[in-house]
Image (cartoon, rainbow, N blue to C red):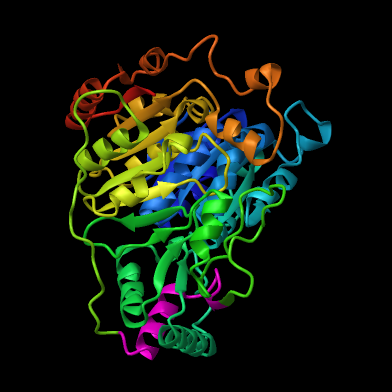
């Protein structure tokens, strides 16, 4: 058993079931090692951004880590944009990054780079495993690090000679010992209980901002009891990695993206409680607009840090408020009625998707300027998981869909993707076809970077003929039907609600991936 064998078997022993991969020469012994370990499902992607995005999607839905296999520094670099998103989503991921043999690095071969230095800004934990005797222990440490609250990116660098050498000692494979989250701080629990009680007595607005670690149905139910007892509203930062949503699940409000809308929304709150998350701030700086979205004088109180036992903190707060036995308010099923004829609008697409979305679907939203309707409309849809952007690096949705579909094979995955963002990682479609994943992708085709056109006005920049060309995707227009078909995904174009309704119904009734180009 060489180092690569010990690495793969340590992954499996500690519950890692999937590896998203784009290997190269330095990883060939890892590739060979998976031959005899069928418990590890290996999924090939044709670009490393798809690899890391798929691992992110898997982690968000399965709420446990997948592994990636990346080829040296440039392979890692290709995957960094979606690692950035995963880092912001608190997604647990174990990156395995191949490197030159330790003795070969001195020759500065063409693919030599500072992999540790490149990995650190996009990782919470980085280590190079120098020998076959250390690789199993280092792998277990990486797995433990990935599952440390709130969920972390662990990057383990595997030199080629570590992979192909046999260890000198035949030691048992180690267990990954995951640190417990920090215990509940009872002083914070009492402080929050007093703030919420006082706010209710005074008629002040109060909100609990929840992290993605307490957006599962069970945690939301606890938060719902707190809301029932105090009148506090449950909130999410606009970019929260995953949240359970829909009828029968405690409703949560998203803070708007746009600065003016967010400031107006948060003006109603004199008290904000942070549950494992940060204060709401603007995505960018804008001239004459605030960076902090909450009003001056707002009382900010932390219930739990990102590394704390957040669910335990909610349970303790509910007990302190005497709310443990209360029944939270739950929205009832109420589906929008979409128009079946006429022109397609952003709202009509949202109404159709929400109307048709099966129970326990996974909805991945990168609709950018065509979105905005989905979260409020889906609040009374069939129960589902909602995934949104986190780090602002675009092109995440189709790769994330790959991982989500593998994490939840019985669920229908629906991806809402803008045409500009989609072009960043369209190689994900090939993996969707190869793995025959139940993913329906809607591409919103307006042939422009509309979000950036909007931002030109927001930042007060001038806009003319030459600058407009930098934000225009026409000449030539993208043809998503041909692009998808070239990677094995059935695709149709919809220009009316009749065509869109028929295409979506067919896609949802058919196994495997499908894509619909939606002309707006």
Residue at 23% from the left image edge and 20% from the top image edge: 499
Q: Percent position (x, y) of residue 307?
A: 55, 70
Q: In the rendered view, would you say 203 is above or below 291?
A: below
Q: Percent position (x, y) of residue 500?
A: 25, 24
Q: Percent position (x, y) of residue 162?
A: 63, 44
Left or right of 7 in this view: 340: left
The quadrant in which the C terminus is found is top left
- Number of marks: 0
Q: Percent position (x, y) of residue 67?
A: 48, 46
302 is within the stretch colored magenta: yes
Residue at 26% from the left image edge and 62% from the top image edge: 249
Q: Residue furthest top?
A: 476
Left or right of 303 in this view: 330: left
Residue span colored magenta: 301-323
Left or right of 323 in this view: 202: right
Left or right of 197 in this view: 488: left
Residue at 67% from the left image edge and 53% from the top image edge: 289
Q: In the rendered view, would you say 155 is above or below 510?
A: below
455 is within the stretch colored magenta: no
Q: In the rendered view, would you say 269 is above or below 72?
A: below
Q: In the rendered view, would you say 384 is above or below 201?
A: above
Whether residue 226 is visible = yes
The foreground one among 400 and 133 is 400
Whether residue 170 is visible = no
- Quadrant for residue 44, please give it: top left
The foreground one among 102 and 473 is 473
The foreground one among 439 and 270 is 270
């Amino acid at each position: 058993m060489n180092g690569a064998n010990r690495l793969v078997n340590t992954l499996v022993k500690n519950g890692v079931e999937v590896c998203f991969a784009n290997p190269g020469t330095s990883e060939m012994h890892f590739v060979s090692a998976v031959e005899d370990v069928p418990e590890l499902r290996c999924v090939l992607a044709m670009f490393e951004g798809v690899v890391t995005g798929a691992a992110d999607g898997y982690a968000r839905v399965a709420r446990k880590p997948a592994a990636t296999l990346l080829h040296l520094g440039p392979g890692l670099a290709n995957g960094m944009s979606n690692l950035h998103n995963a880092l912001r989503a608190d997604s647990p991921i174990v990156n395995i990054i191949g490197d030159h043999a330790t003795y070969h690095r001195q020759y500065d071969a063409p693919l030599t780079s500072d992999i540790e230095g490149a990995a650190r800004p996009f990782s919470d934990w980085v280590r190079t495993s120098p020998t076959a005797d250390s690789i199993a222990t280092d792998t277990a440490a990486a797995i433990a690090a990935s599952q440390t609250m709130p969920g972390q990116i662990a990057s383990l660098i595997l030199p080629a000679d570590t992979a192909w050498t046999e260890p000198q000692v035949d030691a048992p494979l180690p267990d990954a010992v995951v640190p417990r989250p920090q215990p509940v701080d009872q002083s914070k629990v009492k402080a929050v209980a007093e703030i919420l009680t006082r706010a209710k007595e005074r008629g002040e607005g109060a909100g609990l901002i929840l992290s993605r670690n307490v957006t599962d149905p069970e945690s939301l139910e606890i938060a719902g009891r707190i809301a029932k007892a105090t009148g506090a509203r449950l909130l999410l930062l606009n970019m929260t990695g995953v949240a359970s949503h829909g009828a029968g699940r405690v409703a949560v409000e998203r803070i708007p993206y746009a600065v003016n809308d967010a400031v107006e929304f948060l003006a109603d709150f004199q008290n904000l409680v942070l549950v494992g998350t940060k204060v709401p701030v603007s995505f960018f700086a804008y001239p004459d607009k605030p960076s902090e979205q909450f009003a001056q004088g707002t009382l900010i109180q932390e219930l739990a840090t990102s590394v704390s036992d957040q669910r335990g903190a909610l349970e303790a707060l509910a007990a302190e408020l005497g709310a443990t036995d209360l029944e939270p308010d739950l929205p009832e099923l109420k589906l929008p009625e979409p128009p079946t004829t006429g022109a397609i609008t952003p709202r009509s697409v949202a109404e159709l998707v929400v109307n048709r979305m099966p129970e326990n679907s996974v909805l991945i939203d990168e609709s950018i300027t065509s979105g905005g309707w989905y979260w409020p409309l889906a609040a009374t849809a069939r129960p589902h998981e909602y995934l949104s952007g986190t780090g602002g690096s675009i092109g995440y949705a189709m790769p994330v869909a790959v991982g989500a579909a593998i994490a939840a094979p019985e669920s229908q995955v629906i991806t809402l993707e803008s045409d500009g963002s989609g072009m960043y990682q369209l190689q994900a479609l090939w993996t969707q076809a190869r793995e025959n994943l139940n993913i329906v992708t809607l591409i919103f085709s307006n042939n422009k970077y509309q979000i950036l056109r909007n931002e030109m006005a927001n930042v007060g920049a001038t806009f003319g003929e030459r600058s407009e060309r930098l934000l225009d995707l026409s000449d030539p227009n993208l043809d998503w039907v041909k692009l998808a078909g070239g990677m094995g995904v059935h695709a149709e174009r919809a220009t009316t609600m009749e065509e869109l309704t028929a295409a979506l119904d067919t896609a949802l009734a058919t196994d495997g991936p499908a894509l619909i180009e939606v002309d707006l």
